[in-house]
Image (cartoon, helix red, strand yellow):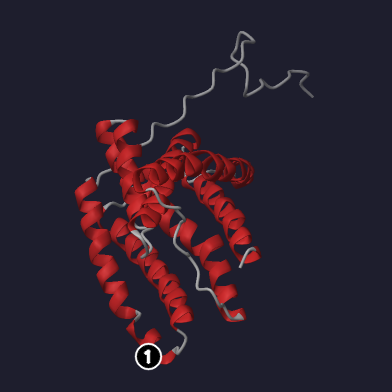
Amino acid sequence: MSDRVPPRPDLQPGGAPVPEMPPAERPLATWRWWEALLVYLLILVVSAFATLPIFRFIRSQGLANLSASAVIALINVALLVLWLQAFHPRWRKVIGFPRRVWPEVRAGLGFGALLYPVIVLGVGIIVNLVLQVITGKSVHSPRQLPAHLSAAGVAISIVYAVVIAPIHEELFFRGILFRSLADRYGFAIGAAGSGLAFGLIHYVPGPWYGSLLLMSVMVFTGVALAWFYERRRNIVAGMVAHATFNVIGLTLILALR
C-alpha cells in the first residue's frame, strides 16, 4: 500500500491555498425602462378586464375590490414572467435569485421591521407637517381597506398584503423597472424612477393632500427597497422585507379599525 498522501484540492502544489474564483458578473438588463412600463400597462388592462366577472358575482363592493386587486396582481406576475421568458431568457440572472434563501429571509425580516417605523414615524410625520402647513388642514392618509370587512375580506387582505403584493411589486418595480434604469443610468436614477412609479400605483381616492401623503410615503419606501435590493443583489430579500413592512402596517390597520 502506498504511503503517498493524495493532494488536497484546496491547496496548490506548493501548499498555498487555491484562490477563490471571483463571482460571475451579473448580466445587465436587456429590456428598456419604457418597454417595461408599456408591457406593464398593457398587462394591467388585460388583467382588469379579466376581473370583470368578480364584480358581477360578489355583491360586497369592498370584498369585490379586494378580490379583484389580488387577481390582477396574480395575472400580472404570470404575464410578466411569460414576457421575460419569451423575450429576455436570461432574466433570472439579471434580477437575481439567491443560492441560499434563509440568509436573505433573515435580512429581509430585519430590514422590513426597521423600515416601517423609519418611514411612518420619520418620513410620514415630516411630509404630514409640510402638507398641513401648505393646506392649513389636518392631513390623514385615505383609508386603504374598507371600513367593514367580513372574515373573507380579512383573509384576502392578509394573503394579498403578505404574499401577493410583495411578489408582484418587487418583481416589477425593483426586479424589472429599477434594474433596467439602474443598469443604464446608475443607482440614483433607478431608485428615483422606480420609487416614483411605486408611489403612483398606491394612489387611493380621497382629498388630494391625503392621497399625496400616502403616495409620498410610498415613494420613499420604494427608494429604500431599491437600495436594499441593490445591496443584497437578489429579489427574495426585498420580497421578504416588503412582506414584513406590510404585516406591520396591516396589523395596525386591523387593530385600529
Of residues 19 and 44, the one nearer the viewer is 44
Of residues 75 and 127, the one nearer the viewer is 127
Q: Residue at horizontal 27%, vertical 66%?
A: 43
Disc 1 designates what residue?
Answer: 56
Q: Is residue 179 visible?
A: yes
Q: How many marks?
A: 1
Q: Is residue 227 above or below residue 139?
A: above
Point out residue 142 in the picture as x, y percentages from the top left corner.
Answer: 44, 61
Point out residue 148 in the picture as x, y percentages from the top left corner.
Answer: 56, 78
The answer to which quarter of the image holds residue 252 is bottom right
User: Mark 1, residues whose alpha carbon is within 10 Å: few (<14), some, or many (≥20)?
Assistant: few
Name the quadrant of the N terminus.
top right
Amino acid type, label 1: Arg
Q: Residue at horizontal 59%, vertical 52%?
A: 244
Name the quadrant of the C terminus.
bottom right
Q: Is residue 234 above or below residue 70?
A: above
Point out residue 246 in the picture as x, y percentages from the top left corner.
Answer: 55, 56
Q: Is residue 121 above or below residue 254?
A: above
User: Horizontal placement of 102 versus 54: left or right?
Assistant: right
User: Horizontal placement of 181 versus 119: left or right?
Assistant: left
Q: Residue at horizontal 41%, vertical 76%?
A: 68
Most distant residue in the front direction? 136
Point out residue 153 in the picture as x, y percentages from the top left corner.
Answer: 55, 77
Of residues 21 and 89, the one nearer the viewer is 89
Q: Is residue 27 visible?
A: no
User: Horizontal placement of 157 versus 52: left or right?
Assistant: right
